[in-house]
Amino acid sequence: MTNRPESQEVIRETVRGKRARDRRSETLVLHWYELATREEVTMSCSAPFFRMESVDGNAVVFRMLPCGAELVVRSPGSRGRHQVFILIRKIEQVMHVLLLSSFLFEKSLLTMDFHILSCRYETEDMEMMEQIVPHQDVQAELDDDENVADIKKLLGVGICTIKGIMMTTKKRLCDVKGLSEAKVDKIKEAACKLSNNGFITALEVTERRKLCYRISTGSRELDKLLGGGIESQAITEVFGEFRTGKTQLSHTLCVMCQIPNETSNFKGGKVIYIDTENTFRPDRLRQINERFKMDQDAMLDNILYARAYTSDHQMELLDFAAAKFHEELGVFKLLIVDSIMALFRVDYSGRGELAERQQKLAQMLSRLQKIAEEYNVAVFITNQMTADPGAGMTFQADPKKPIGGHILAHASTTRIMLKKGRGETRIAKIYDSPNLPENETTFAIAAIGVTDEKD
């Protein structure tokens, strides 16, 4: 593996107009994230051929076709070429794959992590989709809609990327209507060739962790307790009794997510809010926004809201959220579920349904974990508390515990317990975290949302 030079020094853009079969005003816009320099790069062309090349001979060539674009990757250290066909069929739509730079600077295609941030191709008003299964002969496959139909089915259940396929079990893929076991094996095999899901060094993990960001809670003391705010690529759970500030914190985060965090590399973004208890109030958001003086309508327009009515509906909304994260990669930064367990308590009552409830809950939490990691977003969930019948036998100081059992406890990255203080003061305590010490702090809930306690 060669060292990765600065992208500005090694990438040359060559737009070739030869063999132009179609002289319409077509434009291909590429936008990718350079891992080595952590910079975003955008390039475009209006010719049938588009080529990017590095000094060591690695090259990526795009060929414009009447109904899409063909991507061919060549590397001196690999056998021949690696070919992926991409259908881009809708004006102003975006196709997402990650880290194109890895193709340019790695010697072996087997170790490359491929992802374009966005690719837009303007042509007839048709549907856009990302072709996941690679083709050996692109021209021969153009008249066959079988693979296109399979990809539609995957997109319909929120599986939009190669990494998403690798994160999904074969059993769940086979449960997708219209996908046979043979098709699933083919898709899995193709995705495996295009991804690197083996071992990496701790140093590489450190580099990947640099992409994480933190969203401020609105309180400096609470941010300090959380190491800077709500972390991306993680599930942050807050639980407590009624009136401890769970929903108020959720509303404050909707506004804070749109404001850059000075202490991290967070530049702000949109929010998806799933409401299970009908407690979402836009007027409260306007009230909190008075603190920051953003345009009120623009602030509300950056929040995508959905009301969930059943636990099954809640799972369907997560699939929609995953598709939205993929469609607008890098735009949405926060997913809020308030609250995670409310509908499960209604749909599954009694000990006889407890096992089924926990199984469904585990599937939902697994989906949230994959969304957080796959799209580098922060997931914030609220949870309720219940009486612990066995607390008196063990002399516990607090006879209440968060609901959801061990499944929810293990799925949440960071767990925060909220308790009432004096007046509008609330107490936040780190209940469990892989990297934060057990500690607590106080904050206040005011008309401007979550803020620091006044002296």
Image: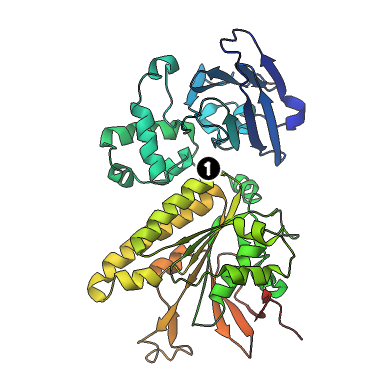
* SS at mark 1 in the image: helix
Query: Where does the C terminus fall, quadrant-wise?
Result: bottom right
Query: Where does the N terminus fall, quadrant-wise?
Result: top right
Residue 453: x percent and y percent? 71, 82
Figure check: 279 above or below 55:
below
Figure check: 420 above or below 18:
below
Residue found 40% across the figure and 82% down from its top: 386
In the image, 176 versus 203, the foreground residue is 176
> Which residue is most to the top?
19
Left or right: 123 in relation to 392: right
Left or right: 367 in relation to 99: left
The residue identified by callout 1 is 327
Is residue 108 something one can see in this rendering?
yes
Figure check: 26 above or below 353:
above
> Which residue is most to the left?
352
Residue 418: x percent and y percent? 55, 79
